[in-house]
Amino acid sequence: LLVCRQWNEVACSTPGLWSQIVVSNTHSIEKARRKLIRSKSVPLDITITFSPRLNGSSAGEPVMRAVEMLRPSIPRWRTFRLRVPNRVHAHTALKLCTKDKAPLLEGLSIQISNAMQDDAYTSPPVSLFKGHTPRLISCSLTSFNFEWDRNLASGLRVLRLGGYWNGYAPTGRQLRDIIKGCPMLEELNLRNMSDLDPECDDLVLSTTHKPQSLIHLPRLHTLSFYYSGIIRTTLLLSGISFPSVRRIEFAYLDDITPAFKAIKRQCFSLVTDSNHPLGLPLDTLRIEGCFFNELKFMRLLRRVPTLTTLELIEVEDVSSNLLKGLSTPPQAQQWIVPQMESLSLEGCTSTSLDWDALSTLVESRIPSRSMTRQQNARSYASVSAMNEEHGNNRIGAPGDYGPPKRLRMLDLTKCTQINREQLEWLRMYVQEVRSESSRSVWVE
């Protein structure tokens, strides 16, 4: 971009404009060096990324050159992101980051794309940044073996771990110790890990005889488990307290019914808590590629009336019984998830998920229809009878949310049992209906 001489001088003399330094396939080291000089003494956001598809084994030299060039500025690093093809490149580069402290580092991300065959480089380098990262609050590690060093992963607010297989996956006790060192944790994400062996893991064996003490995480608002092993996931949920959680994700964990018990336990523990009069503030629940006991799932939904978004992606256990349960309840019960405005049934192609149940669900949550029971109450002969019924309707989950909210988004992508005419009918009552089906590459 060409500018006049005056604006060029202004830009070059403003260090904050050059604080983001990137070295990659399309960003040369020379350009990064120029930015480093112009940044003077401001905190830096460093990104070194080389794609395994474009670089492969040839990424070693440019990665080394980039780290060597940036190494003197480590005390100014605010964030550091490293993405390389394999462990050889990562360990070679990170060895240069062991002799300098990083007092300003707040975010660390190390991603190794192909780590399955790098057995010779499973031992980590010496403690990164001399073990001195007092401001580190966000840590994302993929396939990088740091021997679960609590000096690196402590006092965090965001912790993302992924790509750990077989003997390199964290044990129950290792993961628990790391989380225990992060009492202010706000987001926990576990992805792509071999599951625990219930016959070998010491923490699993100990908890079968004596319940483990809970780790209190008052600020935790997001929990995400993607192919992290159902034993590890259930053990973790059973060992922590998360009274402020707002989003929970389960993906590819086989049977997640045991995890429901841990969430319900958290709901029951908040019933008498004056700081959480409405119970668990969960507003988003996403389940993908898992199966569960439908009845126990319905019981869980009764305990989270604050839920606004329910996503069931490619779940075979979704049937008409679930949709009927979310429709008009019996007179003595409250609505299940009355705040729900977004429902996703993407890829739920079960034959037991029929049109009648779906249309009933949509109609029952239209405000005029959902108020029918209260309008019928006016025909009662006595006011006391009406008040008695109104009192019975309050039985259920904590909080009185009244009639349910109208569905604003309904995702039926890949639901082949729903035809075009039915979709058009749904669009008359739901603001947004998604219905893109998976098409063959031959279809125009």
Image (cartoon, rainbow, N blue to C red):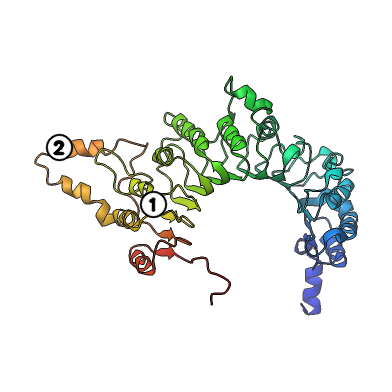
Mark 1 closeness class: few <14, some 14–19, many ≥20 residues within 10 Å: some
Question: Which mark, by number, is residue 151?
Answer: none
Identify which residue is drawn at 79% across, 61% down.
22
Instruction: Give the image location of residue 359, x and y in percent.
Output: 32, 58
The secondary element bearing badge 2 is classed as helix
Depth check: 199 or 127 in front?
Answer: 199
Quadrant of the rendered image containing residue 47:
bottom right
Residue type for callout 1: Ser
Query: Is residue 443 or residue 411 the one in the foreground?
Result: 443
Q: Is residue 8 left or right of residue 212?
A: right
Residue 240 lies in quadrant: top right
Q: Which residue is mark 1?
A: 352
Q: Amino acid at mark 2?
A: Ala
Q: Quadrant of residue 217?
A: top right
For disc 2, the neighbor class at 10 Å (few under 14, some 14 to 19, many from 20) is few
Q: Is residue 356 visible?
A: yes
- Secondary structure beneath dot 1 equals loop
The Cα–Cα distance between marks 1 and 2, rounded to whole angstroms, is 39 Å
Q: Tell me where residue 251 appears, x and y as whole percent.
A: 57, 47
Residue at point 64%, 24% (across, down): 205
In this rendering, the answer to whether 370 lies above or below 253 is below
Q: Give the residue pinned by disc 2.
A: 385
| Quadrant in which the C terminus appears | bottom right
Mark 1 vs mark 2, foreground winner is 1
Q: Is residue 363 left or right of residue 153?
A: left
Q: Report the quarter where the N terminus lies.
A: bottom right
Decide which of tag 1 and tag 2 comes sooner along the chain.
Answer: 1
